[in-house]
Image: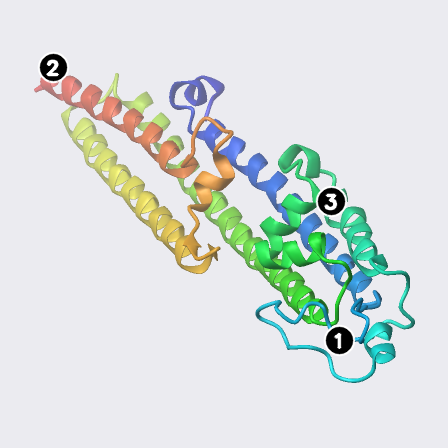
Amino acid sequence: MTATDDAVDGSRAALEDAREALRIERRRVIDEREAFRTFRGRVESVSTEATSPDGSSAAAGFRGVAGPASGSGAAADAGAGGPAGPPGSGLAAVRDAYAETVMSVPHYEEEYDDTYERSVAAEFGPELAYALTRSAGYHPEYEPALIDAVESAIEERDRLVERLEVEADSLDRAGSRLAAVRREIASLDAAVPEGGFGALDACRARAGVLVEDCDRIAARRQRVIAAHERDLRLDGDAVDLPTYLYQSTDATYPVLAAVGSVGERLDGLTRRIERAIARVG
């Protein structure tokens, strides 16, 4: 395909822009996943604490986790990570670990620019976020809930990386097949001026086959998009991955846009062939 051909339909540019956006997003998701893994390791070493005078947990009302810790106040204070520090030191350690890992990924400011409170609410939910930012201490009940939430954040990004790899394969496959169609369009286009009726009729038939090829490329792409929606559900909602990935590009659905552009070239070629047939007929 020549540079002029690409300028005519723009299909290659749409896919190249999509590949670049996909590359950036994949790098960001992997950075976040690794940051959460590091954060998990830091959290596992943070001591839990209890602040009530009798040693019982002040977080007994925290839903979704175990009830008050059993045992003496000293045992509750010690937690899993060793001797307890000053009241609130556990929460401070969690906050510092989060800021130095999750909030320190290279794209954090550009992509999120959230405060600590807003970020943990978005990642872990409002209840756990309240416990981590408004409590008097890092109580034993918080630790398993936080570890579970971090595991969910890691798994969420694992799933997204898998879908991004499927998406990359879909872009490459569509790009390769569309490139073959564009080459044939150029070949047929060059044959029109000198073709007799038989040759032109063969060109018309071949152009029809290329239209069917484009329809198959579009249908396959629609199946991939549907698979994204089935397999990637965040916060209970199906994610339209192309919209998420390509909102900053000229084509939110780059493969379908590219197919449409090539289809327009095929329509023009078919009309040209029909006119040529009319002249020689």
The residue indicated by pointer 1 is 56
The residue indicated by pointer 2 is 279
Q: Amino acid at mark 3?
A: Met
Q: Earlier in the sequence, mark 1 or mark 3?
A: 1
Q: Report x, y in % for residue 281.
A: 7, 20
Nearer to us in this view, 277 or 157? 157
In the rendered view, does 4 fall on the left or right side of 92?
Answer: left
Residue drawn at the location 26% of the way across and 16% of the way down: 193
Quarter placement of the N terminus: top left
Callout 2: helix, strand or loop? helix
Q: Report x, y in % for residue 38.
A: 78, 58
- Around disc 1, counting alpha carbons within 10 Å, would you say few (fewer than 14), some (14 to 19), or many (20 or more)? some
Mark 1 in CB contact with mark 3 (< 8 angstroms): no
Callout 1: helix, strand or loop? loop
The residue indicated by pointer 3 is 103
Per the model, the C-alpha gap separating discs 1 and 3 is: 33 Å
Instruction: Name the mark nearer the viewer: 2 or 3.
Output: 3
Nearer to us in this view, 177 or 123? 123
Per the model, the C-alpha gap separating discs 2 and 3 is: 69 Å
Q: Earlier in the sequence, mark 2 or mark 3?
A: 3
